[in-house]
């Protein structure tokens, strides 16, 4: 699951995602590294971010990850 939200909506989105319990998360995504990537938050306003799909470096303002081409915008 991927969720992209505007900066002003981050707190509300984080609260909504917390509804998904740890037990359900572990059952749905047993691999710890995949679970970490699936639940990561990407700050597209930061100077650089880490792509949740490939862990590549994404520069501010990029619409796609330069490594895997995951679309952000």
Image (tube, grey):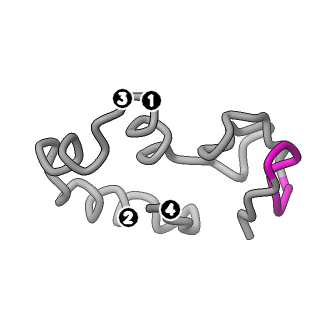
Query: Are the residues tagged 3 and 1 within 8 Å (C-beta)?
Result: yes
Q: Residue at x 68, y 43 (%)?
A: 51
Q: Indicate the secondary structure of the residue bearing disc 2.
A: helix
Q: Nearer the viewer, mark 2 or mark 3?
A: 3
Q: Nearer the viewer, mark 1 or mark 2?
A: 1
Q: CA distance from mark 3 to mark 1?
A: 4 Å
- State the image quarter where residue 54 is shown: top right
Q: Nearer the viewer, mark 4 or mark 2?
A: 4
Q: Indicate the secondary structure of the residue bearing disc 4.
A: loop
Mark 3 nearby-residue class (10 Å; few <14, some 14–19, many ≥20): few
**Magenta stretch contains residue 67:** yes
Label disc, if present, on residue 2 of the rendered structure: 4
Residue assigned mark 3: 32
By secondary structure, the bulk of the magenta-drawn segment is best described as: loop
Q: Earlier in the sequence, mark 4 or mark 3?
A: 4
Residue assigned mark 1: 33
Q: Which residues are magenta?
A: 61-68
Q: Earlier in the sequence, mark 2 or mark 3?
A: 2
Q: Earlier in the sequence, mark 4 or mark 2?
A: 4
Q: CA distance from mark 2 to mark 3?
A: 22 Å
Q: Residue at x 79, y 48 (%)?
A: 68
Q: Indicate the secondary structure of the residue bearing disc 3.
A: helix
Q: Residue at x 74, y 70 (%)?
A: 73
Q: Nearer the viewer, mark 4 or mark 1?
A: 1
């Amino acid at each position: 699951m991927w969720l992209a939200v505007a900066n002003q909506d981050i707190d509300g989105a984080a609260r909504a995602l917390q509804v998904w319990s740890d037990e359900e998360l572990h059952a749905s995504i047993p691999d710890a590294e995949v679970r970490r990537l699936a639940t990561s938050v990407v700050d597209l306003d930061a100077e650089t971010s880490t792509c949740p799909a490939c862990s590549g470096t994404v520069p501010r303002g990029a619409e796609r990850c330069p490594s895997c081409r995951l679309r952000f915008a």
